């Protein structure tokens, strides 16, 4: 009789372990979700930069972190072009801040 009760309790506990693990996973945001969100912001900024059709804007790299902070780096042919890139990045939904690391270099 005791063996039967112990077996039932063991089986019941074994069945609850996956449910407890799933509940713990559901509480924390997924790294995949964060990556997709960051990638979507980066892609949107790059699309907006390409739509401007300024040749200096294609040499600008965009990086977005998990909090929506965007870093723009690379080169631009003029300060107004670099400022335009910053303005475009700031206008994208989900962007919390923009760090301008764009270097201005004259075209050769």
Image: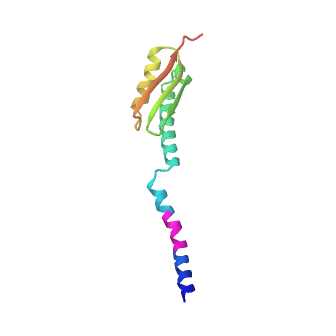
Residue 101, how many percent across, how many down? Answer: 49, 22
Give residue 3's quadrant in the image. bottom right
Residue 59, how many percent across, how many down? Answer: 56, 23
Residue 47, how many percent across, how many down? Answer: 50, 32
Front in this rendered view, residue 56 or 8: 8
Residue sitting farthest toward the right: 108
Front in this rendered view, residue 1 or 99: 1
User: Image point 49% across, 57% down: which residue?
Assistant: 25
Front in this rendered view, residue 7 or 99: 7
Residue sitting farthest toward the bottom: 1
Q: Relative to 6, does residue 45 appear above or below in the rendering?
A: above
How many discs appear?
0
Q: In this view, does 82 lie to the left or right of 58?
A: left
In the rendered image, the quadrant that contains the N terminus is bottom right
In the rendered image, the quadrant that contains the C terminus is top right
Residue 65, how many percent across, how many down? Answer: 48, 36
Q: Relative to 49, does residue 41 appear above or below in the rendering?
A: below
User: Image point 41% across, 25% down: which residue?
Assistant: 87
Q: Relative to 101, does residue 43 appear above or below in the rendering?
A: below
Is residue 15 inside the magenta stretch?
A: yes
Q: Relative to 23, does residue 79 appear above or below in the rendering?
A: above
User: Image point 55% across, 72% down: which residue?
Assistant: 14
Front in this rendered view, residue 4 or 41: 4
Image coloring type? rainbow
Secondary structure predominantly adopted by residues drawn in magenta: helix
The stretch of residues the image draws in magenta is 13-20
User: Image point 52% across, 17% down: which residue?
Assistant: 103
Give residue 92's quadrant in the image. top left
């Amino acid at each position: 009789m005791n063996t039967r009760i112990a077996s039932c309790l063991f089986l019941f506990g074994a069945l609850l372990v996956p449910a407890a693990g799933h509940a713990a996973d559901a509480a924390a945001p997924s790294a995949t979700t964060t990556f997709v969100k960051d990638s979507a912001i980066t892609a949107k900024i790059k699309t907006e930069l390409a739509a401007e059709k300024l040749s200096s804007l294609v040499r600008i790299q965009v990086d977005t972190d998990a909090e929506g902070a965007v870093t723009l780096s690379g080169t631009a042919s003029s300060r107004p072009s670099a400022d335009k890139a910053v303005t475009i990045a700031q206008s994208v939904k989900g962007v919390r801040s923009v760090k301008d690391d764009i270097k201005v270099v004259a075209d050769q």
